[in-house]
Structures are given as C-alpha cells and as structure tokens.
Amino acid sequence: MENYTQILNEKFPGLRLNCEINQRGILTVSGECGNWEQLVDIGHAAAKLGGVKNVVSEMTVKGLVIPVKDYSAFKHNGQAIGTVEYVDVLIIGAGISGCAVARELSKYRLNILVTDMADDIATGATKANNGNIHPGHAVAPGTLKATLNFKGNRMYTQWAEDLGFDLRRCGAMGAVTDEQLIPMLQKAYDIAKLNGVDGVELVDAKRAYELEPGLARNNHKDIVGALWLPSLGLVEPYKVATALAENAAENGVRFLFNCTVADILHEDGAVRGAVTNKGIIHATYVINCAGVYADEISAMAGDKCYTIHPRKGVIAILDKRRTPIYNSLTEVFTLESVKEMSAKKNAESKGGGMCYTPEGNILMGPSAIEIPNKEDLSTTPEDLDYAMGRGSHISYSDVIRFFAGVRAADFTEDFIIEMSPITDGFINVGGIQSPGLAAAPAIAEMVEGILVKSAGKRGAPPAPNPNYNPVRKREIEFRHLSREAQDELIRQNPSYGRIICRCESITEGEILEALRSPLRPASIDAIKRRTRAGMGRCQGGFCQSRVLEILARELGREWAEINLTGEGSNVLTTDNRPSCALCNGKQVNNA
C-alpha cells in the first residue's frame, strides 16, 4: 500500500499532513494549510494517487475560519414537529438534477417528494449557468462525466420536444490563426472522438469560413483551421428545470419548498428518511441532489465519502442591443490569446468565454474562483474582469446585470452517482458541476436504473404509472407570436393585451398563466425566471411594482408580504401610500 502521508508531504514540503484510507479507497486528509488555494491543490493531488476513489478533506487553513453550516435549529424544529410524511422516494434538491430525477421516476407508481431549502426550483447553480449543452469534448475520457455528457447531449432533442422548451443547436467552433495551434485543435478533436461526440470535425480554413460566415464578416482573414462541434446546444437552464418540475408534478410528484434537510435517518445499514425544519419525512429511498451541500447530506447518512470545494463563477449579461457576432459559439484563438488564457485559467474548470442565450442576450463568463464559503455569491471587480476578459469588442456599458453561482466540485472533478455501500437506499448524486446541465437526462436515467435495480432486489419492483404523460404543454410567449396570432389571442383573453414588462414585451396573461402552474411561483424573481418579466435592460425598474401588484392580488396577500427572492426578502415593509392600501382592498381616510 502506498504511503499517502509521505507522498503528499514530499509534494507539499513544510506542511504536516496526515492521511488515512479505508477499504473503499476514500482518503481522508488532515493538517493545516497555508491558504485555501493550497488546500484545494492538496485535495486534487490526493485524488490522483493510485488506489484513491475520492478524498475527504479535514484540512484547516491558517488564519481562516472555514464556514460550516449549522443545522441544529432546523433539526430541533423538525424533531419538535414530528412525523409529517411517509414517502417512497425523497429527493433532496430541486435544481436541474433533482427535477430531472423526479420527472424520470414519475413514470412509476411511487410516492415522490422533492424538498428544497429555497422558495422555488432552480435557485442555486442551475439558474447561475450559461445554458450550454456541451458536446463532450472538454471532459476527461474514461470519466463518468464523459459518458453522461455525450449521452445527455443526445437526449436533449427529445427532452425539448416533450417538455416544450427552446433548444438551439447552434454548434461551436474553435478557430486558430497560427499553424502552431493546430496540435491544440488535434488534441481536442482526439478527446472528442474518444468521448463519442457526435459530428465533430477538424476542418481547414475554407470549410471553417463556410460553416461560420461570421469569421469573414468580422474580418478574420487569417484562419488556418478549426474544430467544429455541431452538437452544442443552448437552453435557458431555469426554463428546463421548470419544465421538468412541472411535468413531474403533473405526473404526481410533490414539492416542498423552504424545507432544509438537517439530518438523515438511518439504522441497521439502511436509510429511513430525513429530519427537516418542517418535520420528519420517512422514506424508503433518499436521493441526494443537494448541490454544494451534497457532501454534508451524505455525511449525515453515515457515508462521509467526498468533500465539495466550492468554485464560484461570475457571469455578466449584456443588453440585447449588443448582438452575437457569430451564428455558432465561436472563439478565435491566436498565439497571444492562448498564452494569456493559460496564465489565468483554472486548470480544473472550463471557466471564461462568451456565449448567448436562446433569447439573444450575450453572456460573458463564467469565471472560476476557488472559495471556502458555499454561500458566497458576491462579485468582485476581479471576478467581473475575469468573466469579461475574452470579449475584445465588449464594453462594460453593455452589461445589464451580473451574478454569481457556486459549482459543486469534488476533488476527483467527476460526478458521484451511486447507491451508498454504507447506507442502503441512500443514493448520492454529488459533484454535479459542468457539464451537469448537458448530462442531466443521462444522470436521471442512471439514477432510475440504480433505484429500479435496488427495488427489484428487495422483491418490490416499482409498477409503471398508468397515467404517466411525458409531454408538457408549451407556455405562450406573446413576444414570439405573429401580429395576427397576437391579435387573436388578445380577442380571446384581453390580459394578453396588457404589457407588464416593456423591455421584454411580457404580458399580464403570461404572468397569470405562470401563476396557474402546478408549481406556483411566489416571489418576484420566481416570476422573472418563469416569464422573463424584469430580464430586460431596466432589470425590473419599470415592471417590478406591476409584478408585485399582480402577485399580491392573485395570491391573496398584502403587498408587504411579497418577497423578491425568498423568505424574508420583502420588497416593501409597510403600506406607505394610499394607492397601495387601496390595491390591498383597504379603505383610506385622506382627511
């Protein structure tokens, strides 16, 4: 057996690291590091050692208090409330993975409950995502990521058809201006072929100009070759999650929001359920899709087998007046740009770049910064500079909003999808970072296979849901209709004739339709994600009050009870104008 302690101490001299490995190959590393970046480097180095399946960090950092979430109050509340549910399957987390798994399992006659600590679906890394359905050329061959990436990419076409969301297969191109960079393209091509990427081509300059007219249009006359990836797609990730969740709900899955899991119940080597701030939920199976908290949930289940090291990414959204300059996602590499990119790029992340959304907004980023705090969503000038760094023709005046998300990376930089060998019935879906969005259909299918196989071994295979319907009706998008169709819609329903968001041309009818969803949005930001009201240049400056008014009216609440983005984020605290009071149905004495 290798002396892991000796190896790591020789690689990182001056430290006093200690390593312990169990029979599963889980290596636990302890000791004090000089800084957070060093801790992450040690974790990555440990994960590459022979015989190591994954790494648990018990390392500390000199002079730094690593934030740790305190679950005690949530647990105390749940225990005081007692049992509130008995379910077959409890899914923790309503991001893209949790919603995909819920929809996949809804084809069976199972009592399924999805919990999330936030007030809506897709409020974590899923919404802070650039929406690329990656082809699979940028992941290490032989990894679970690689297998599920290319498979999931293929499955998106059917997903989009069934669930009614926009998928734009625009393709991606990496073009180079110097023969010295051709080996870089060849390496990427070889990886893509190993990973089974559909349609990948290594093309000469003539073919590159044919495939991407924007090269000539933007005066790139010196292209010598390119890598062409036609299977890359673009989606709005929160729209995909919404479609999955709504279809799951239509097929019988229930969702419980503002619900924090504080402990996992397990005994005699089997999972029994979870303690949440809303009570105890007993479950036959618990599926851990908890994002950056997945390692903590797994430890609660008695299976401390990996550590999430948060990686923050900042994305800048540009105004639609700045239109994409290429038809595909294209980047032109020069010798100078490759050197600059190599100097600052996180070796474990794709980070950086430019893309655009199906609605036409250019996105800059994301950055890729290792951080100790899983809830650090701040944006520093350096973060924004990193995100904006690969757009020479872009100005900061084009930015209408920037935001951060946190990737759930483990030290192997791979997905962790398995039935726990320690706690039967507990299924880990951890380490889901890019290309987690692209892989989501295949992730869900893999989890389905794990659960069905387990249930069969127990002598209770799940019966098919006789009412399962994989199709979700596409919502009306007034802005994309012809004038004739808009006129007809307004004649049928006058609420579609009242524009609420002028920047994006979102109507009251669309907001009302979103509020009729089986997963009713209850905050201004939830409406924003469902309808795009507030996503334009003014970022809700004109329409936010109108949306607030509609929410209060339709939900039967006071204006001051409406939240911006979750519990406790009230936009207003009191009724301070007569008009507000009147809208709440009150009588006002103006004397």
Image (cartoon, rainbow, N blue to C red):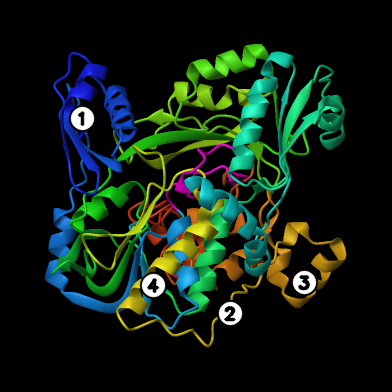
Decide: marks 3, 2 in contact (CB < 8 A)? no
What type is the residue that disc 3 sits on? Leu
Q: Which mark is residue 469?
A: 2
- Secondary structure beneath label 4: helix
What type is the residue that disc 4 sits on? Lys
Q: Quadrant of the N terminus?
A: top left
Q: CA distance from mark 3 to mark 2?
A: 27 Å
Depth check, mark 2 against mark 1: the one in front is 1
Residue 245 belongs to magenta span: no
Residue that carries the numbered disc 1 in the rendered image:
4
Quick one: 495 or 124, which is closer to the camera? 124
- Secondary structure beneath label 2: loop
Give the prevailing secondary structure in the magenta stretch: loop
The residue that appears at 34% across and 72% down in the rendered structure is: 454
Q: Dividing the picture into quarters, in which one does residue 327 lie?
A: top right
74 on left or right of 370: left
Residue that carries the numbered disc 3 in the rendered image:
489
What type is the residue that disc 1 sits on? Tyr
The residue that appears at 55% across and 29% down in the rendered structure is: 352
- Secondary structure beneath label 3: helix
Residue that carries the numbered disc 4 in the rendered image:
453
